[in-house]
Amino acid sequence: KMDPAEFRRRGKEMVDIISDYLENIEQRPVFPDVEPGYLRALVPQEAPEEPESFDEIVRDIERVIMPGVTHWHSPYFFAYFPTASSFPAMLADMLSGAIGCIGFSWAASPACTELETVMLDWLGKMLKLPEEFLAGTAGQGGGVIQGTASEATLIALLAARTRTVKKIQAENPGTDEEDILPKLVAYASDQAHSSVERAGLIGGVKMKMIPSDDKFAARGEALRQTIEADKAAGLIPFYFCATLGTTPSCAFDRISELGPICNSENIWMHIDAAYAGSAFICPEFRHLLNGVEFADSFNFNPHKWLLVNFDCSAMWVKKRADIVGAFKMDPLYLKHDHQESGLVTDYRHWQIPLGRRFRSLKMWFVFRMYGLKGLQQYIRKHVSLAKEFESLVRSDQRFEISAEVVLGLVCFRLKGSNALNEKLLKRINDTRKIHLVPCHLSGSFVLRFAVCARTTESKHIQFAWKHIAEIASQLLQEPRQ
Amino acid sequence: KMDPAEFRRRGKEMVDIISDYLENIEQRPVFPDVEPGYLRALVPQEAPEEPESFDEIVRDIERVIMPGVTHWHSPYFFAYFPTASSFPAMLADMLSGAIGCIGFSWAASPACTELETVMLDWLGKMLKLPEEFLAGTAGQGGGVIQGTASEATLIALLAARTRTVKKIQAENPGTDEEDILPKLVAYASDQAHSSVERAGLIGGVKMKMIPSDDKFAARGEALRQTIEADKAAGLIPFYFCATLGTTPSCAFDRISELGPICNSENIWMHIDAAYAGSAFICPEFRHLLNGVEFADSFNFNPHKWLLVNFDCSAMWVKKRADIVGAFKMDPLYLKHDHQESGLVTDYRHWQIPLGRRFRSLKMWFVFRMYGLKGLQQYIRKHVSLAKEFESLVRSDQRFEISAEVVLGLVCFRLKGSNALNEKLLKRINDTRKIHLVPCHLSGSFVLRFAVCARTTESKHIQFAWKHIAEIASQLLQEPRQ
């Protein structure tokens, strides 16, 4: 068994292993060449009876693990949206692992809870969130780290459900919850992430998708019409999840139109800005967040684009009482002396899981070691790389841009059939030199090019475009099938 | 901004910082002496504009963080249940952070998914789980890493809800889901964790607590009576969450009695063995798991007692189709070539969040570097330390043991009033030399003594008992108030 002295040695070896991995990641094919089930054949069928050495395990990293890794931090990775990685965040995670506290209540580790509240205030100020969302020392709002945006969407929906049920019961004493739930209806844009629809399924409520406009944005008028029809049919609208930076095309729902409608209808507006939210720390992108003042809750993922390693999804609410009230339970083994003091936050009431890691350390290290200016530079670099790729696409008559390029995502396609573009994408990914994923926009099969890695530079963009254009040329020269 | 060369240096400094912390943790008071709000005064109100140096941050670890940390890995920490910490797990987490893949689908990083499936098979075999729970190459079951036991409880409840609704709809075509949901009823022991009741709230279904027997165990007869009454009232029983090792007293629901009832009534039986599950790798404790063959799903937390750092909650199901079917959604940006091949697992369908870290690396490192024998030794050591503490309590006539000591938890109290025991606990915790939390058992206020830290030895148990006995002596000598 490993003692502290051996850990000192092995820990330093591991620092070198991961430094080597990240320094040389460009040399690896970005997408693995393995078939499903490849790994089972490479390892024993059972755990060993006797201990093995660390050296044996290190050897197996290259033999067993690396052949099957999709290298999300390769500068040739342009798929999905980015997931963040930075050295300060990794250092903080090492410390978090060693402290190893479970911060479900203030008393379970005060520093874990308090640093989180303060870091969410720091970040809220970077975004220039309305004061109401900040905790400060006397605020009614505040922030929390969720694992993922999906959980934030769900928590907000559950809080809205409880708030609405309580309101109806207050207005109509004696009404049963089970008579209310079947009438509740939630909304989101038809471009919203699949996890929004899933939140409705989990919460056991109806969820309707609002048709988006020709820029893939949800608009006030469409929402208003749906609400009117639903109310006329006896339903109770209670929740709207707006998206800033949709997954297919990075479109922005018009929250300045949608928000006032939600406010006047007592509908909880949650904003999911999972990817785009990080950009709002730059003054030139902050206008995209205008309308947040109408929201009840707001969420984005520093673990996507703000250099804080997964998991770190930042969520703010205007009224902590709403979210805590959704399902507060206090068994004796979780009670503590300071519980009722008002200054104290027990984050277990804000989330689905009970346990939670000391994740705010990652934010603290990253915000301090980059500084606001360094983080802004990072966002700007990615946006300019996306614009560079957009120009390359626009300079080639065979291609078209499929949606406005606002941040780091470029949606594009060959002018022509969906089948042609499906073939193009398959060939691109089969070469394993770069990696992209597709989306559907208005019935068209579209390629998504997202600037992802921290180390992506102009040369990688130029390489990627040259590679795509060459494959397109080959494809277009082939006889039609 | 930190470059790879600086990370090599700073990473090694961090290895020394965390080694120093863990080697000297005994010297720190186990529970912090801070008031709510202490941290905000120690840090700036906003993030810095310009980058700060790593040295500044390191200085602040002792100044800002450590004064507010509850030291869960101090050998004087006996509160809640343990949270795991081991050097191999920390090394694996470093690697996981560097790879930084998001394993929501097989294609998003095949190694991340495949190692997880194989590690859950390894662990299932260590527990001697019935074959049906293993994935193998052709099984219908299999395992997944959830973040916490709370999430496993919820996922199982949602899967049960969907299975039941589908079954009723198949038998009664045209039945609306919203007519079924209000009739569904779930069950758990009155000793079950608060997260079980919460899962019912989230899922929008009734949850009833089955009265436990004089050993704090749920019994078949009590469940049967409740089911009969509920069916007679027109309700539809659909889910029972059994607990092996309850949070208050580490009691064991009688799953051999409860399971056959659930099976014959088409009730999904989920087993939550969050803490106790790790012990089942020892042949002498495996009988506590007898009856698991009746369960639809089983869960425990290697991150509690099996030396795998948080988060790592292991969950198995007999039928993967049940859990995937609960809310499978496949937007185009998440589809991939191998999706329909059967050999492939897309774990996003098994969990609440979409994103997921490469957590199985921690299991792989720990299982290999301890070996099954090393893990068994670790469990046995903790159980024997608990028995040692039990003997000390029994040797003092002023005290009584409040529940059978089966594993690493001892429930005890001074013979006398609840007020007396509340005062005893408060004094113990106020000294900050050891840390415990209480529970209620049959109306009595009881102190819980859980063997927690990896480094707890007999001398710490002896110290803790001497300390408790002394405080009791002082307390009992004071004039009654």
Image (cartoon, coloured by chain):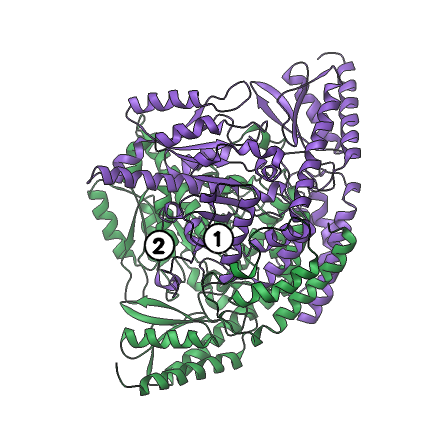
Chain colours: A green, B purple
The residue at which mark 2 appears reads as B329
In the image, taking residue A51 as reference, residue A407 lies left or right, namely left
Camera-nearest residue between A97 and B139? B139
Q: Is residue B176 visible?
A: no
Decide if residue A414 is on the left or right side of residue B306: left
Q: CA distance from mark 1 to mark 2?
A: 17 Å
Q: Amino acid at mark 2?
A: Met
Residue A21, position in %: x, y?
62, 69
Q: Is residue A459 above or below residue B30?
A: below
Instruction: Quarter of the image for the C terminus of chain A: give it.
Output: bottom left
Question: Which residue ends up furthest to the top in the rendered image?
Answer: B480
**Nearer-the-camera pick, A152 or B174:** B174
Instruction: Identify the subunit bearing mark 1.
Output: A
Q: Amino acid at mark 1?
A: Thr
Image quarter of residue A170: top left
Mark number displayed over residue A148: 1
Q: Are marks 1 and 2 on the same chain?
A: no
Q: Residue at x 45, y 77 (%)?
A: A431
Q: Quadrant of residue B178?
A: top left
Binning the other alpha carbons within 10 Å of mark 1 as few (below 14), some (14 to 19) or many (20 upward) gives many
x and y, in percent, of residue B139 in the image: 43, 50
Q: Give how far across and how far down residue B234 sits, in percent.
A: 28, 25
Mark 1 or 2: in front is 2
Quadrant of the image occupied by residue A236: top left
Chain letter of disc 2? B
Task: Give x and y (percent) for residue B284.
Answer: 62, 33
For the residue pair A346 and A416, the one nearer the viewer reads as A416
Q: Secondary structure at mark 1?
A: loop
Crowding near the residue tagged with mark 2, few <14, some 14–19, many ≥20 C-alpha atoms within 10 Å: some
